[in-house]
Image (tube, grey):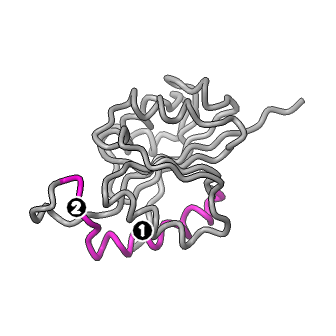
Amino acid sequence: MTSLSYTLILLRHAKAEHDHGAGDHGRPLALRGRRQAAALGDVLRLAGCVPTTVLCSDALRTRQTWDLASSGLSDPPEQVRVLPSLYEAAVPEVLEAVRAVSEHSHVLLVVGHEPAISMAADYLAAESSDDGSLAQVRVGVPTAASCILTSDQAWAHWGRGTAQLTAVVRPEA
């Protein structure tokens, strides 16, 4: 019997506008962020990371990032859930959301915010992960960066050091 592989993509939203009275939660993507987000779908597709499930913060900029990125994917995900708990989340909230995903979904995309994205990637990454990617998540990831982690363990069993951080990728836009 072969074990199945699970891929988690932890994505920081694309570049957002500064707060112009809408409050942090309502900040839209900047023009640069729109270009980044539109290019994300191609980046994920070319990396072989087309999600079957998406968990997205309910902030405007994360929802816009996902909407624009999804247009570049070959297949729509089976499930997209907008979760208020991912806004202002810390590692425990991100892990709780990941662990609740069905084991039948093998590629999971979480669209969220810093510092939770890089901290969750660092927490999940085994020491044998890619050195450059580990260094990047330990200082934080830029906007529109995707941290790609893989493991043969079902989502419910993901915890400290259980996955290989294989790459941190970002669109050219």
Q: Earlier in the sequence, mark 1 or mark 2?
A: 2
Picture quadrant where residue 32 is located: bottom left
Q: Is 42 part of what is drawn in magenta?
A: yes
Q: Amino acid at mark 2?
A: Arg
Query: From the viewer's perspective, is 43 left or right of 15?
Result: right
Q: Residue drawn at (49%, 30%), measured in percent from left and top?
A: 124
Check the picture and name the quadrant holding the N terminus.
top right
In terms of depth relative to the viewer, which is nearer, 143 or 24? Answer: 24
The residue pinned by badge 2 equals 27
Front-lying residue, 80 or 153: 80
Vertical order, 79 against 41 (above or below): above
- For the record, the magenta segment spans 24-48
Under circle 1, the secondary element is: helix
Q: Choose between 168 and 107: the one closer to the eye.
A: 107
Q: Which mark is residue 48?
A: none
Name the residue furthest left: 21
Q: Which residue is labeled 1 in the image?
A: 37
Residue 147 locus on image (x, y percent): 47, 47
The answer to whether 59 is drawn above or below residue 152 in the figure is below
Residue at position x 36%, y 43% in the image: 84
Q: Position of residue 82 (x, y in %)?
A: 44, 49
Marks counted in the figure total 2
Where residue 132 sits: x, y (%)? 45, 45
Q: Main secondary structure of the magenta part?
A: helix
Q: Position of residue 171 (x, y in %)?
A: 44, 67
Marks 2 and 1: in contact by CB < 8 Å? no
For residue 61, which quarter of the picture?
bottom left
Question: Is 50 located above or below residue 135 in the figure?
Answer: below
Assign the C terminus to one quadrant of the image.
Answer: bottom left
Q: Is residue 77 above or below residue 17?
A: above
* Element type at mark 2: loop
